[in-house]
């Protein structure tokens, strides 16, 4: 049985093409709908069933958070018997999803956690985030771009490194600080996308601007029950929380404090997964495919599987795909029916 590290996406990965993808039978979707109903909120399946995609509705934190996680949970149900899953992790909000995947929280409690964290953002966006590439066209690190980003962060008040995301850096800060960063960072055009790019309807997560949110969560979520994970869990520092060996108080403290208010190092997390577990494949859960390129860029940085650049990665994916995404139709059969 092949080994796999499973990676959950962050909030906002549910896009227009994800509509109507969550209408099937799924225990996780049932639980997510139950939690939303208990909280007198429109259910996940009802959100997914809308005839048209609305950025304001589908990407807003109070809906997008559990919508994203429920899609990931549903995907995970389909692979749990096909692979030896050696570790789980996630990007940003995906850490909460990974808590449920690992068994450190029940799916029910995980849905409560995620829905509450999303609810804090309802009509209450705190600052924002923007993303900026730090790799060239070949997906190798461009140190001059990193230097420029760091100089901007050092020179603009209330601007922080939010996420180290493979070939990108996500900045978080106040609206004013992001406007200054947009002016100071050299404009880049990659395909049809212009950078620096403001992420719509995102608060400045993983910065000190969210300290009040962290305090609220500690109080509001104290009834949830953290437990020993069944599968190793990697967090946004690259730390491994192991079955039967996890300090549950520390894991819960990290989840509601450091994870909310300090830089999320997705790059270190994937690096740790590769070095410590050496999986046969990396599986990116849906919805969407927002983290596939970031995962590949970390593998290139690590020279993993002999990868040195984007061309190497593209060739590997043609011959022997090792980074698999539920949102790529051509890879779905490989995920569900792996060769032994």
Image (cartoon, helix red, strand yellow):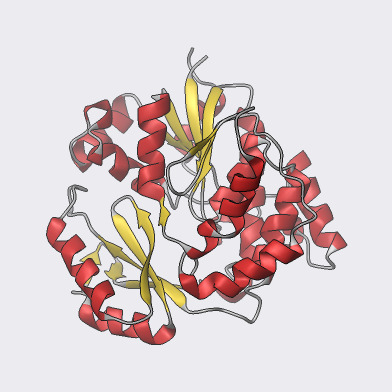
Question: Is residue 262 placed above or below 229 in the rendered structure?
Answer: below
Farthest-out residue, left: 144
Q: Is residue 62 visible?
A: no
Front-most of residues 51 and 200 = 200
Q: Is residue 6 left or right of residue 129?
A: right
Residue at position x 40%, y 49% in the image:
266
Residue depicted at 35% across the width and 55% down the height: 164
Comparing 60 with 331, the one in front is 60
Q: Position of residue 311 (x, y in %)?
A: 19, 39
The x, y position of residue 238, in whole percent, is: 42, 42
Left or right of residue 123: residue 260? left
Quarter of the image for residue 149 reads bottom left
Where does the image place residue 32, in percent across and percent down from the top left? Answer: 76, 52
334 sits left or right of 193 in the view: right
Q: What residue do we see at 17% from left, 64% from top?
A: 147
Q: Is residue 147 above or below residue 234?
A: below
Q: Nearer the viewer, residue 289 or 174?
A: 174
Question: Residue 50 placed where, x, y %?
Answer: 69, 65
Residue 9 visible in the displayed image? yes
User: At x 42% / y 71%, what residue is drawn?
Assistant: 129
225 displayed left or right of 92:
right
Question: From this viewpoint, which residue is outermost toward the bottom?
Answer: 176
């Amino acid at each position: 049985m092949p080994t796999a590290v499973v990676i959950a996406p962050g909030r906002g990965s549910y896009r227009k093409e994800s509509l109507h993808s969550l209408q099937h039978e799924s225990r996780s979707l049932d639980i997510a709908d139950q939690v939303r109903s208990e909280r007198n909120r429109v259910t996940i399946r009802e959100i997914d069933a809308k005839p048209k995609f609305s950025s304001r509705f589908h990407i807003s934190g109070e809906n997008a958070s559990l919508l994203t996680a429920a899609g990931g949970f549903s995907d995970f149900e389909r692979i749990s018997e096909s692979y030896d899953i050696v570790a789980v992790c996630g990007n940003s909000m995906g850490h909460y999803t990974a808590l449920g995947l690992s068994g450190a929280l029940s799916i029910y409690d995980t849905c409560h956690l995620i829905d509450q964290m999303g609810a804090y953002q309802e009509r209450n966006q705190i600052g924002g985030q923007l993303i900026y590439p730090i790799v060239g066209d070949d997906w190798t690190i461009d140190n001059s771009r990193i230097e420029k980003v760091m100089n901007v962060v050092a020179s603009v008040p209330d601007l922080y490194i939010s996420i180290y995301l493979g070939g990108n850096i996500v900045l978080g800060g106040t609206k004013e600080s992001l406007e200054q960063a947009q002016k100071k960072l050299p404009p880049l055009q990659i395909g049809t996308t212009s950078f620096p790019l403001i992420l719509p309807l995102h608060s400045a997560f993983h910065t000190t601007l969210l300290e009040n949110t962290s305090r609220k969560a500690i109080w509001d979520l104290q009834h949830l029950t953290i437990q020993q994970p069944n599968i190793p869990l990697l967090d946004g520092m690259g730390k491994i929380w192991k079955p039967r060996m996890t300090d549950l108080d520390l894991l819960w403290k990290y989840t509601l404090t450091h994870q909310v208010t300090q830089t999320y190092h997705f790059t270190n997390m994937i690096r740790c997964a590769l070095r410590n577990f050496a999986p046969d494949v990396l599986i990116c859960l849906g919805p969407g495919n927002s983290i596939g390129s970031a995962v590949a860029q970390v593998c290139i940085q690590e020279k993993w599987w002999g990868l040195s650049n984007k061309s190497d990665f593209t060739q590997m994916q043609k011959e022997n795909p090792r980074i698999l995404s539920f949102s790529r139709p051509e890879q779905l059969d490989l995920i569900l029916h792996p060769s032994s």
